[in-house]
Each structure stands twice: as structure tokens, then as C-alpha cells.
Amino acid sequence: MSRTITYREAVVEALADAMEEDETVFLFGEDVAEAGGPFKLSEGLLERFGPRRVRDTPISEQAIVGTAIGASLSGLRPVAEIMFADFAAVCFDGIVNELAKYRYMTGGQVDVPATIRLGNGAGAGFAAQHSQSVENWFLNVPGLKIAVPGTPADAYGLLRAAIRDPDPVLVFEHKHLFNHKGEVADTPEVVELGRAEVVRAGSDVTLVATQLMRHRALEAAELLAGEGVSVEVIDPRTLVPLDLETIGASLDRTNRLVIAQECSHDGSWGATLVSRLMADRFEMLDAPPLIVGGDETPIPYAGGLEELWIPSVERIADGVRRTLAF
Amino acid sequence: MSRTITYREAVVEALADAMEEDETVFLFGEDVAEAGGPFKLSEGLLERFGPRRVRDTPISEQAIVGTAIGASLSGLRPVAEIMFADFAAVCFDGIVNELAKYRYMTGGQVDVPATIRLGNGAGAGFAAQHSQSVENWFLNVPGLKIAVPGTPADAYGLLRAAIRDPDPVLVFEHKHLFNHKGEVADTPEVVELGRAEVVRAGSDVTLVATQLMRHRALEAAELLAGEGVSVEVIDPRTLVPLDLETIGASLDRTNRLVIAQECSHDGSWGATLVSRLMADRFEMLDAPPLIVGGDETPIPYAGGLEELWIPSVERIADGVRRTLAF
Amino acid sequence: MSKTASSTVPATVPLEEQLEWQRAMLEIRFFEEECHRMFARGLVRGSTHLAAGQEAVNVGACRALRPTDLMACTYRGHAAVLAKGAPLDRCFGEILGKAEGLCRGKGGSMHLTDMSVGAIGSFAIIGAHLPIVLGTAYAEVYRGSDGVSLCFFGDGSTNIGAFHESLNLAAIWKLPVVFVCENNLYGEFSPIAHTTPVDELVVRADAYGMPGVRIDGMDIGVVHTTVSEAVARARAGEGPTFIEAMTYRYKGHSRADPGAYRPEGELERWLERDPLILHERALLAQGVEQTVLDEMRATAERTVADALERAMSWADPAPETRLEDVYA
Amino acid sequence: MSKTASSTVPATVPLEEQLEWQRAMLEIRFFEEECHRMFARGLVRGSTHLAAGQEAVNVGACRALRPTDLMACTYRGHAAVLAKGAPLDRCFGEILGKAEGLCRGKGGSMHLTDMSVGAIGSFAIIGAHLPIVLGTAYAEVYRGSDGVSLCFFGDGSTNIGAFHESLNLAAIWKLPVVFVCENNLYGEFSPIAHTTPVDELVVRADAYGMPGVRIDGMDIGVVHTTVSEAVARARAGEGPTFIEAMTYRYKGHSRADPGAYRPEGELERWLERDPLILHERALLAQGVEQTVLDEMRATAERTVADALERAMSWADPAPETRLEDVYA
Ligand SMILES: Cc1ncc(C[n+]2csc(CCOP(=O)(O)OP(=O)(O)O)c2C)c(N)n1
Ligand SMILES: Cc1ncc(C[n+]2csc(CCOP(=O)(O)OP(=O)(O)O)c2C)c(N)n1
Ligand SMILES: [Mg+2]
Ligand SMILES: [Mg+2]
């Protein structure tokens, strides 16, 4: 049996179920407890689990990330919330130099099962410092796993997997999807990290997208279906580990690749994916891989401008058309 | 007339000449003044320019970057030193959210001519947190310019250009090259940002590399010349702006691309370059672009391990051979 | 609270200037009320944070500065930016995302900036601007000029790393900075005691050997006097000062927040000491006619409404402008 | 300084334990001397930072802990990690980059870690570990156990943001942490007064409502007593303490630094109060025979030499191990 819930509800439920399952799981961050979370992603959890397991912190992101690392070393499974993902910049050292490298630098002496949740993405007019898709800052940092759920089912399933995982996982929750509704099973599934989802099968072109772009990619695919084009839409769901097999297998059939991403090109996961696929599947491609992304600019505030910055259904469809026309 | 100086001497000379030329240029950072710099990159400058223009700071990288931003807003040309580039992580917010976006978010009200110099790269056993090639963290951050000098001439010329530039420039100075010697003109040239250098002309394959890798790429090219292979070695010198024209023109002749980089693959400038070139020059390539880089791991301490992590001349040459054999 | 409490009148400030304070506070209050209505009508994107209740801190402090002095504030910055002299219409324009907005529609409510009046920025990442005023202040020292940089920030912001680094560097370099903490008792939904182990934030100044003072932030006279002293010391090369101004925000943290976490009666108690009321009483006590004040209020309301109307009439930014201003 | 000055003998510490302190300090001193020679011979990669002179702080503090308590220290951490109980040979092994080094050769001198003895890490990014002990300490609270986390850091590190956030959170959460500042007067080549506007760092504890105390860090008895009290308070749920231990590093900042920036005679003055000498005098005063101490010294020297010899004989890490330990 299944039911329809919002992305936000899925996050709350995942947190609750994880805490129910494992006594070592606890949640902390700014206003996550008494206020139920700045985005209401922990509503009711303080009441249910008490202040030992659901804790408010000062405005101190470095201390938050450090607490997550230390608690991990001591065998707990901390879940830290960084309100807007952009604030990862104020605790970047803890994430990239400590959290990511702890296991390695100690020669494997410890597990570091910390989960860091971050509110990602654009679309609501929060401007350049509260709208970024911040997963791209962490791609060149071996040691982290990166989850980018795009649906309620994945928001639930990837968060549960992240919390169980013995390695640090950054879970980017997309702010513009918090009210997005989707199906989950009565007992929702845990989604293995590193498994892409073929969201829609198709044969003419492989269209890869995450989070908000996944939905626009689907819409574009439907639009194009009306034009007689069969688009396969794939959501990698985690960028590290990256399921190159599923994407590659699709490419082997379609021979054309389009990526839709909510970020500028350089240093992006899309560019990374192109480079990886080129190395292995150069000969499979009939057209140059095409990335539909944000402009090489910060994200503007004004509605009309932000709308142009974020790839639209039409821009994505157009990318597909150009790739097919090559 | 020209002379031979070290990379370190080139940096000191560039700083001195910039301060001589422009009264608004000043240098600050940890131990840059009285001690002449932790890496002796500002030796003699305090004596010459006094404490107003050459200043020591506390161990406070956020304050250092902030000072650079503020001084820029007020019309000075600050040059801030971040000792090891890895420490950019503790002041990441200032760089990516403030410095990079200031002009944009204010609708172009100000120039932000700050220069941030950072000690980059591996090779001396400083381990995972003091050896990274940190330019990759900034690729997905529009608004910054990124210089990666590999020779004394470029260390001089790019730093001078960075200081004159009206935009923020991160200048990554490679620690393992500080004692490296090279030719500079008696009055060394300022190197325009965004112009790659064709370091060695060749016709069989285009080999792109920066900093330490540039030198190994050259050695590999010489090695391969002995095998009858003609390698064109190109050093982009700045990653933003990126001189796609020069690299692309080379590719149009060689039809084969190898990149040597001192970092892991995902989110790297090499992956970015591959993706950009694929978009424009897909049909020019006769073989898949190949990246010779560091492992997808943090950088290990032990000599034998670090040596394996950093691409060697032999590994680079091998990459070229494989590309040619495709 | 006595029904006749009024703001303290600094002997040295001409009545005319004191009337200007009231005018500025009134315009700001009306501005914020318009913003509140604009959200309700869906005209404001993202979030917005009103400073209603805190006007005395912003106006009292900014009017202790010269026009050429610099000021940085937070996302709760409409009041500060207006107090420093930014035009009402272009502030509205920015919040509405218009081409003629202060930042060409690229910044929005949280990022009002007007370099031309010395409002160097509104900062929405907690603590981010404190390091930046170090640089503007050092530039004054560097040039041998006597300009001052003033920096507003909230109580909750005193727990972030950048705060610490900034106060330390400002102190050791003896920079001409005035740090003004707008202690409105809450950081988002958390009362300060929930996150901060000291009762008075001003004790933190001691950690930097910096003079610190805690004042009534509802009393514009007190704010003005205290900040003026700090500014004078800064100009004289005697270094930074930390001022903790006790104040209150009447609205919730941001537009989505009704402020349900506040103890009953708290808002009402603060409203009794509304800076506009306190200062009106002070003006009356100095012989200003009530009708003059009533007219000032009416004019302010009209001025603000006109500014909004103008801003509403402006064009949206042209699409291609989004690609401008990344590099020079 | 009197030629008969000695360390303070805490009445409650058995003589046997006091002898252990001396043994530990001797081994550490010899260990560091070997390191010094190893650099000279090119056996150490990167940089290395010797703690010679600071042994009383590390040993006095670590011996106030239980084996199950946790300790984090800086890149100048050989002494602390050894004091917490890490084996000499595997520490040497790590510095030499051997497969049997504490961290399999992946960490090196700046990153000695031995979780099995509660030495959770040596941290080379200034301030990075202070937030981390918040988590280890909270884990004790979480489990209802009474373990304590002790955190060493330098004087210069008190100017970085992470210091501030950590002391604040530790205080507001009343975490069982003991913060031990090794004030050796310099951060790299900068005397503390060059970078820090307060004479005594301990005043910074007040900014967090945290008990703070400044002590003689050359006197192992004083260190041990002070840390023991702080540990007891932490165990009892009374929260963190800040201890500023005045000490001195005999060598320069790192291997490349001859320490030329020091005023003449400074090193000599500190050497007179060498913790090994002070404590030897205290032991003699309690009736320990000089011959026993001489033999202890000789044994320590031999033990260290043997450990180094063993470590030198170990194999380099196998190439493929560099790809291990990234993920579980
Ligand atoms: C680094 C960072 N962390 C968290 C936030 C989210 N946030 C925005 S406002 C705010 C509360 C700030 O409180 P305070 O400093 O007291 O200012 P006030 O809102 O009361 O004016 C928080 C936590 C942020 N913007 N930046
Ligand atoms: C964030 C950061 N900035 C700068 C450095 C470079 N650095 C290494 S040690 C050191 C001095 C630290 O001084 P102190 O805290 O007093 O410790 P000590 O070396 O005296 O033990 C500095 C600046 C660093 N490792 N990390
Ligand atoms: Mg507040
Ligand atoms: Mg020190």
C-alpha cells in the first residue's frame, strides 16, 4: 500500500523512523527543536524524542559540524542540520578537511557516520547567497558521499540510508520541493546510496537530472513525447557514489546525452559526468553531450531574472532537440 | 635581457613592483611582515615598505579575507596571503559568498580588486590537509578569477595582473615550485589573465597541464619525442578566464587531448575542460579525452604513497601513449 | 513603565536635528509597514525581516556618522540603510526586484546596498560583514583619513566565529570601527539565553580589551550619545568600541514567523517604550507643538506611499542584465 | 629563579605516580630529540613541530584523565599523544611513514592519532579540533557516562573563529570538556602581544561564563592539580573549564625555524625552569635517590632508542594501501 506525502513530511518521517530504529541517532542544528526547524523539517520531533535527541544550537555552524564529527568518533549517529546549504561555506573546513578525511588520515581507525542535511537550491527569490546548489563545492573532496533527493520517496529513502551509512553523507534537501507531493509506500523504502533511478524509459536520448531539474526534465520528456521523441530520464540520486553503470547503459542505447542542472557549468556535477562518460563511452556518442544549466553568474533576486537563470522545461526540451538535431 | 630567478623570488619581486607602482597596494597575512612570510614570499618587504603596507595578522583567516574585501570596497588594492591554500576552507564563506558575489549582488556598484594568494599543491609530505590543489573548490563559483602560475615568469606576471585587475583574483602559488628556477626578462612582463601559453609545440596530441604538472608534462613530452611522438604542451595559466580558444585551436590540429592534473577527477578543472571542449569540438576528437590525475583519495603522507598519488612523468607519458593508441 | 517616559535629550543636539530623527524613524516605520503589506500581497520574493521597534538604534547610530562614514548591517537592514540615507523609492524598488532598485534587482530585501551614501551592504550570512568593516576601516587608517565604519549585527550573531576574529583584529589594529549589537532578545526563534551562556553580551568586549557599553536601544538620545562618543574615539585613533543596544523587534523573525515563542505580555511591554513615542514625548517636552509632529507623521506617511507608488511603476530588469555585473 | 625551585607536589598523588610522570616526560623529551635528529637526516617529510619544554602541560594534564577519557591536540602533538599512552614505536613509525605507523603512514608527524588510547587526533588546521571535542563530550552526556574530553591548543589559536564557537557551545551545553591552552608565547614567529589585544588569554573564559585559570605550565604538580579539578567538575556535570598554562617551546616553531625572533636570554630563563628539572627536584625532596632518577633517565633513553630502531626496521606501506580507508 502506498500514500501521498510531501517532501517535507518525508524528511520528518525519515528522521523519526531513524531515531526510533537506532538509539544512537540524534538531530541538532539551529532552531530544529523548539521551533520544529526553520523549514519545519523536524516538526514534532522534540516532543517525541526529547531534548537529548533533538537539540537547538547557537548560530555556530563550525561547532555544529564539529559536534557531528566528534559524536561520530564516539559511536553515535549524529544528524546535523545546516539551514541553507550556502552556509556550508562557514563550516567548510570541518566538512572538507576534517569530516571527509578523518578515516583516511587515521589509517582507518574510525567510522565517521555523520549525516549533514542542507537546504539546497533556488526558485523562491532568496538571492545569490541562499539559493545555491552547493553539492558542487564538494565534488573534488574524496571521502564524502553526496545525496540529492528529488522526490518524497528519495528524501525519505536516501536520508535513512545516509544515517545508517558508516561514512559521512551530505544530504541536500531542495527547498523548492518541500511542498512537492509524491507516493511513498506505507513503510517507505530505504534507498541504497549509489543507485540511479530510471524515472522514465526512452530510447532517443538520455536526460540526466536531479532535484528540481528532475521534475522539469520529466515535463520536458512529456512535451517531447508529443513531438515523437522518446526521452529516457535518469536521476542519479547520489553524486558520490555515482551510478555510472545505469547512466552508461542508457547511453549505450540512446547514444545521446543531455544533462539538466541547477548550477553553472564549471566545476559542476554535470561536467564531471560528461568527463567520466567520455572516458569510457566516447564511441557510443552520436552527438556532443549537452549541459543545460544556470548562467555563469550568481543567482539574481528579481523574479524574472531568477526564472531565466534556472533551466526551464522549455530550455531543457530545447537542449534535447538540439542534441537530436546534431 | 633576461635573468634566472626562482619562483619565490618572482613572487617577492612582483609584490615589490606592484607596491612601488601603486600606492594603494598593500600586503597582509600571517607572519608576512616581520618574518618575511612563512614561505619567505615577502622577504624584505616590511623593511622596504613599512608596517602600513606590509602587515602581520592574527591567525584569523576570516578576518583576513574580510579585510581584503572591505579594503577593496574602499578603493585600495589589498593582497592577502593565505599560507596553505587548504586554509581557504576556514574562510570559504568570505571568498565564495562575499568576495565573488559582491559586484553582482550590488548591481555593479563597486569594483572588488582584491588579490588572495594561496600556497597550493603537494609533493613535500605535508599530508592531506596541507597539500591540496584548492583551485577546484572555486570552479563552481562565478565571480572569481583563478590564476595558477607554474613558472617564475608566470608567478610574476600573473600576480601583477591579478593585483591590477578590478575583480577578485585567487592566485595559487605552488609550494613545490618555490625553489624552481626560470627565465624572466630584466623588466618582467605582466601576463594577461585568460591567455594560455603553448609551452611546447607539437602535432600529435594536446597535453594540458598547470603548475607542477606543467613541468612533468614537458618532461613527458621530451620522453615521448624520443619515441617519435610530437606532443603540444599547453598551460592555461588561468582557469577563470579559461583560454578555450588556444586549447581548442591546438585540438583542431592534434585531435587528441590529455590533461595532467594534481587533483582527483570529480569536480576538477580537467573535467570542466573536457566538458567544455566536448560541447564545441566533439567532432574534432579522434580519441576519448584522457585525464591523468590524483587518485580519488585524500593525499597520503608517506613518501612512497604521495609519490604514487601525484601524477608522475611516466604516468603522464603513458596517458599520452594510450590516447595515441586508441 | 511611566506613561511619561521619554527619550533622553542630548544637550548638544539642535532641536532641528532631533526633529530629523523623528522624521527618519517615522519614514522607516511606514516603510516597514508597507513592506509588511507587500508580502501579504505576494510582492516580495524570498524572505524579509522587519526592524520595526529597532528604529532608535539604527537612526540614532547612523545620525552620529558623517555621510562619508560607512555602515554595514544585516538582512534586517531596511531601517539601517534608510537611516544612512538611501532613497525610499529605490529601496522599495530593490525589494520589488525592479531595474531601478538599489542593486538593479539583483540583491533584494536582504541585500540593500547603496555605496553612494556609505551603506556598504546588508548581509544575510550571519557574521559575514564584521570582517568586511575591518577592511573599510583599515582603508581610512591607510589613507590617514579619519573616517569611521559602523557595523550593526544581532545578538545571535555574537556566537559565530567571524564575530570573534573581527573584534580581535579590530582591537589589535586599533581600527576605527563601532560595533553595534542590536540585542532584540532573539535569534530567529531562540531566546538569547537558549544559545548564549552570558547574560550581558557586552562582557564579550573584555575578551578583546575593547571598551564596551550596554544601553537602552529604545532611547534614541542615549543611542546617539553613546555612538557619538565611540565615533569620536574611533576618529581620534583610539580604536573600536562595542555597544550592546537593548531593543526589540515587534514582528516575528521573518515574514513566515508569527512570534508564538514569545512570553505573553513581552511585546506589549516593549511597545510601551516604542522609540517613536519616547522621542515624540522628548520633542514635546522641548516645546515642539503636537500639530507639528502630527503633520510630520502625515508627511512621512505620504512620502513613503509616494515612493512606493513610484517604485511600483518602474520596469522589471531587462533579461540580459542578469548576465552583467559578474566581472568588471 | 631559585636554583632549588621545584614542582609542586600534590599531597594526594602517590610517589609512584609522580615517578611515572617523570618517566613519561623523559621518554617524550628523548623522543623529541630523536625527531630533531631524524629531520636533520631527512627522515621526516613535511614539517614537524616539537613540544620540548611543554612536557609538564601534556603529561600533567593527560595523567589527570582516565584511559577512557579522550584527548585532542595540535600538530605540536607528539608529547600529548605519547602522554595519553600511544606507543613510542608506532609514533615513530608514523612520522617515518611506515605501514605500522599509528595511521598506516597516512597522517604523519602532524596527525598522530591513536583511538585505542583515546588520542583522537592531532590537528594541523588551527582551531579545527575544538569543535570536534564538543561532539565527543556530548556523546558522554548522551550516554549518561561520565567521560571527559580534553583539548589542547596554542595561544595563537585563541584568535580563530572555531575557538569562539566551541567555547560558547561547550558552555551553553555544559559539556564535559577541559580546554587547555598551551600558551608558549608565540604563534609561529609572532609573539602573542603582536596578535592579541589582551595580556592574559584566560580573560576570554568570561565571555562564555566559563571558569578560567592561568597556571604555571612548567610545574607538573600545578598542571595536574588544576586539570584534575577541572576534570572532576566536568565529570560531575558542571561543565567546561578553560586553563591557560604558561609554557615555552625550546625549539623554533617548526623544523625550518631557528627562533631568531626571540629576545635574548628568554630561552635561557625558561630552561632554568625546565619541567624535568623542576620535577626531579620535587622527587628528590620526597626522598627519591638520585641514582634511581639517573637510572630512569638512562632507561628512558634506551627505551626510546629501541623504539626508533624497531620503527626504522618496519616496512613502507604497500602501494595499494593508499587507496584504502577513504570509505568504509
Ligand atoms: C551563517 C548563518 N547561519 C544561519 C543563518 C540563518 N539565520 C538568519 S537570521 C538568524 C538569526 C540571527 O539572529 P540575530 O543575530 O539575533 O539577529 P536578528 O534576526 O534578531 O536581528 C539566523 C540563524 C544565517 N543567515 N547565516
Ligand atoms: C587555519 C590555519 N591558519 C594558519 C595555520 C598555520 N599555522 C600553523 S601553526 C601556527 C601557529 C599556531 O600558534 P599557537 O596556536 O600558539 O600554537 P604553537 O605552534 O605555539 O603550539 C600557524 C599560524 C594553520 N595551520 N591553520
Ligand atoms: Mg536578535
Ligand atoms: Mg603558541
Image: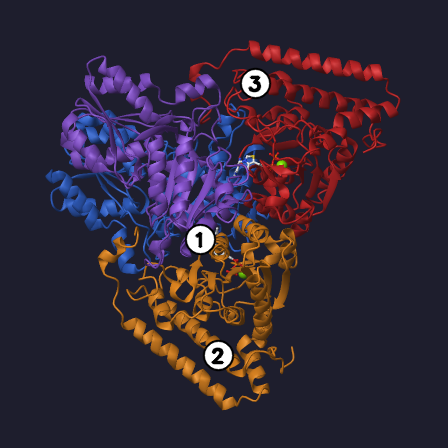
Chain colours: A blue, B purple, C orange, D red
Q: What residue would you read off at disc 3?
A: D40
Q: Can see residue B147?
A: no
Q: Residues within 10 Å of mark 3 (few under 14, many from 20)?
A: few
In three-dimensional space, the C-alpha distance between marks 1 and 3, rounded to whole angstroms, equals 43 Å
Q: Secondary structure at mark 2?
A: helix
**Image height of B210 relative to A313, above or below:** above
Q: Residue B13: x, y in percent?
A: 40, 37
Q: Quadrant of residue C84?
A: bottom left
In three-dimensional space, the C-alpha distance between marks 3 and 2, rounded to whole angstroms, equals 72 Å
Q: Chain of mark 3?
A: D
Q: Secondary structure at mark 1?
A: helix
Q: Is residue C239 left or right of residue A234?
A: right
Q: What residue would you read off at disc 2?
A: C20
Q: Quadrant of residue B173?
A: top left
What amino acid type should be assigned to the residue bearing mark 3? Ala
What amino acid type should be assigned to the residue bearing mark 2? Glu
Q: What residue would you read off at disc 1?
A: B71
Q: Quadrant of the N terminus of chain C?
A: bottom right
Q: Chain of mark 2?
A: C
